[in-house]
Amino acid sequence: MNTEEEKIKARRNIYHALSAGFYVPEADNLTSSYSKEFSENFKILEAWTEAKEYVQGLENASESYSSLEELLIEHSKLFLGPDKLLAPPYGSYYIDDKVTMGESTRAVMDIYEKLELELSDSFKDLPDHIALELNFLAYLTEQQLVLSEEHKSEDSGENVLKWQKYFLENCLAPWYEPFVDRIKNNFDSEYYDSLADILAYFLAQEREYLARIA
């Protein structure tokens, strides 16, 4: 039986891995260690039976590429252009009726600011990019571990959980399902289809988890 701390670390790791998967691909995204990151952590969460098909799909797809350039081309067609974006990775596109940097983007930025966080200079995209929102949830999950290790008050821990639930329900839940649909219906990519399936499954599990404890 895995401890609660191990499960929190597993949730954080999956958020990080998903964030890396939806940002500009790097060589590591095509390695067996990348798909292994999902399999190991879903097993810790006792969710491997349900996630197995999606993770194995990702692993199989990774083996089909002869170079990183092939994956970069698919990533560009889906998320960058230069033609029409097949699956815009920005929350405001879905929430604010196909407008980027809309009111929902400002709401996301307000949350970052309330928690005294600034965007890294190395991040060259919009604040409501799927990769950044997932990375932010990884950060909030990490804070559960920090507070536990520092023996902070129970109220502090509850506040972090409330932020996780609030951000997931109000900033990500309204658009991740149509985003997943656009990936799966607008382009033929086993890699991103599998990654989208992992995203949808994991976030559904997170919503259930946070609804129970936050």
Image (cartoon, rainbow, N blue to C red):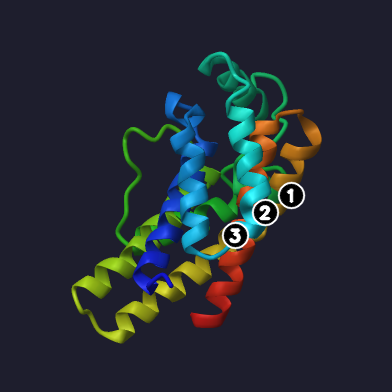
Residue located beneath label 1 in the image: 178
Cα–Cα span, label 1 and label 2: 6 Å
Q: Quadrant of residue 57?
A: top right
Residue at x 36% of width, y 64% of height: 114
Residue located beneath label 3 in the image: 203
Residue at x 48% of width, y 31% of height: 29
What x and y, as percent, mark residue 10? 43, 59
Circles 1 and 2, Cβ within 8 Å, touching? The answer is yes
Circles 2 and 3, Cβ within 8 Å, touching? The answer is no
User: Tag 1's secondary structure?
Assistant: helix
Q: Quadrant of the N terminus?
A: bottom left
In the image, 119: left or right of 131? left
Q: What residue type is labelled 2?
A: Trp
Q: Nearer the viewer, mark 1 or mark 3?
A: 3
Residue 110 appears in the rendering:
no
- How many C-alpha atoms fall within 10 Å of the one at disc 2: few (<14), some, or many (≥20)? some
In primary-sequence order, the first of circles 2 and 3 is 2
